[in-house]
Image (spheres, helix red, strand yellow):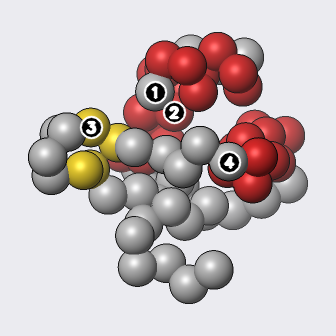
Amino acid sequence: MAELARRLQVSRCWIERRIWNGTIVIARDAAAKRYLFPDTEETIAALQTLKSGNADHPNFAPNASK
C-alpha cells in the first residue's frame, strides 16, 4: 500500500480511511493478510478519480464484476 500511496501522492492513512469507511471496496488477502490492489493502470486511474472527487466506491473485491 505504501507504493500505491506514493504513486497517488497521498498518505497510507488516506487509503486506509477510505477502506475502513467503505469508500474503497477491497478484501484483505487471506494469505498475505494485506490489502492487495491490482497493479494496473486502471487501478491508478480509478483511485486518482476518487482522489479528485469525481468517483464513488471503486471496487477491487475479487468477485467484483469487471
Mark 2 and mark 1 in contact (Cβ < 8 Å)? yes
Query: Circle 1 is placed at which residue position?
Result: 1
Residue at image point 49% right, 46% down:
37
**Can see residue 62?**
yes
Give the left or right position of residue 52, taking residue 10 as reference. Answer: right
Provide the secondary structure element on which disc 4 rests. loop
Q: Position of residue 17 (x, y in %)?
A: 44, 35
Query: Circle 3 is placed at which residue position?
Result: 34
Mark 2 and mark 3 in contact (Cβ < 8 Å)? no
Q: CA distance from mark 1 to mark 3?
A: 9 Å
**Crowding at mark 2 (Cα within 10 Å: few <14, some 14-19, many 20+):** some
Task: Tell me the kind of residue under disc 4.
Answer: Thr
Instruction: Tell us which disc is closer to us: 4 or 1.
Output: 4
Provide the secondary structure element on which disc 2 rests. helix
Task: Tell me the kind of residue under disc 2.
Answer: Ile
Q: CA distance from mark 3 to mark 2?
A: 13 Å
* Residue 9 position by quadrant: top right
Mark 4 and mark 2 in contact (Cβ < 8 Å)? no
Which mark sits nearer the N-terminus, 1 or 3? 1
Which mark sits nearer the N-terminus, 4 or 1? 1
Image disc number at residue 15: 2
**Crowding at mark 4 (Cα within 10 Å: few <14, some 14-19, many 20+):** few
Query: Circle 4 is placed at which residue position?
Result: 40
Q: CA distance from mark 4 to mark 3?
A: 18 Å
Instruction: Tell us which disc is closer to us: 3 or 2.
Output: 3
Q: CA distance from mark 1 to mark 2?
A: 8 Å
Provide the secondary structure element on which disc 1 rests. loop
